[in-house]
Amino acid sequence: MTTKKADYIWFNGEMVRWEDAKVHVMSHALHYGTSVFEGIRCYDSHKGPVVFRHREHMQRLHDSAKIYRFPVSQSVDELMEACREVIRKNNLTSAYIRPLVFVGDVGMGVNPPEGYTTDVIIAAFPWGAYLGAEALDQGIDAMVSSWNRVAPNTIPTAAKAGGNYLSSLLVGSEARRHGYQEGIALDVNGYISEGAGENLFEVKDGILFTPPFTSSALPGITRDAIIKLAKDLGIEVREQVLSRESLYLADEVFMSGTALKSRRFVACTAFRWAKAAVARSPNAFSKPSLACSPVKQTINTAVGSG
């Protein structure tokens, strides 16, 4: 049994106690990774709990299911209301929300039988920053992984699918074995893709760069929020293929993602290249020893006052 994080989980339309939300060990998703999910943040505000980019997240959940041809009986609006229900039921003001669509006990064939249905759960619980609260202020150590992201014509990177995250496990666990907090994956062509579970940005000469989706990067919702916010602030943004060496030449590099968490809405964890890191490893990027770049500081200020 997992450590209890909340009292209730929404399970196929019913509110079930945390300890009673169980699935069979022969569930298809457990054997073949047939699930899609979302990670969403709910923030406390003067108007009460606010779910960040709620509709976009639930639409992406539907889109991920559509890519894999998973039937989902609930509409986007119904899933949004279910999120609100589980937040209220657990008396939460700020929380991490995990909707999950998975294929249950439908048989052992890789291809589920005709007319099968999926199970849907939505959990909400308190969860701090993914890489630790200190990472938000102090930055992290990261390395370029020896593992590449999968090619888009093998596993669709636009879908946030459970099985896709085995790649993330390899990237992240390799980094931790070598003493770093996070890994950076390249795509099959050797260009920058993303972190183990985050989108990546570079700042150079006042311009904000980020890899395109064609580099096997997930269409991140927090990524999209940062891009739109930066443009509103008059910061030039370029979505383009980025070479590995651009990491070494950037003024700053930071990551974005829902689980990372940061002030209010935008989640950014920064690290900066330092010459001292060369002695450690040619793949290494050190914690920032200076203040944030003007570009990221502008974004942080806008988020903090938003």
Image (spheres, rainbow, N blue to C red):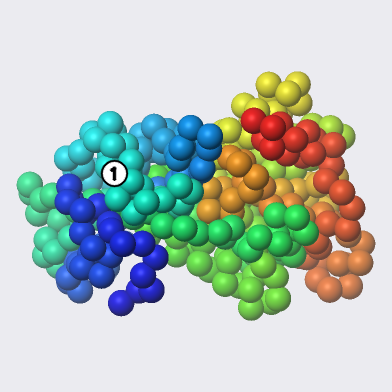
User: Relative to residue 77, is residue 130 depicted above or below?
Assistant: below
For the question of whether residue 146 can be seen, the reply is: yes
Give x and y (percent) for residue 300. 73, 39
Residue at the spot x=69%, y=37% of the render?
304
Q: Is residue 177 left or right of residue 53?
A: right
- Which residue, as the protein is rendered here, is positioned at the far right? 275
Give x and y (percent) for residue 146. 63, 66
For the question of whether residue 193 can be seen, the reply is: no
Q: How many marks?
A: 1
User: Relative to residue 289, is residue 50 depicted above or below?
Assistant: above
Residue at the spot x=84%, y=73% of the render?
280
Residue kind at label 1, given as amino acid type: Glu
Give x and y (percent) for residue 243. 73, 46
Q: Quadrant of the N terminus?
A: bottom left
Within-10-Å neighbours for mark 1: few <14, some 14–19, many 20+: some
Residue at the spot x=30%, y=50% of the render?
89
Q: Nearer the viewer, residue 78 or 159?
A: 78
Can you tell which quarter of the image residue 21 is in? bottom left
User: Relative to residue 179, is residue 192 depicted above or below?
Assistant: above
Which residue lies under the disc numbered 1? 85
Residue at the spot x=71%, y=62% of the render?
134
Task: Say what secondary structure mark 1 lies in.
Answer: helix
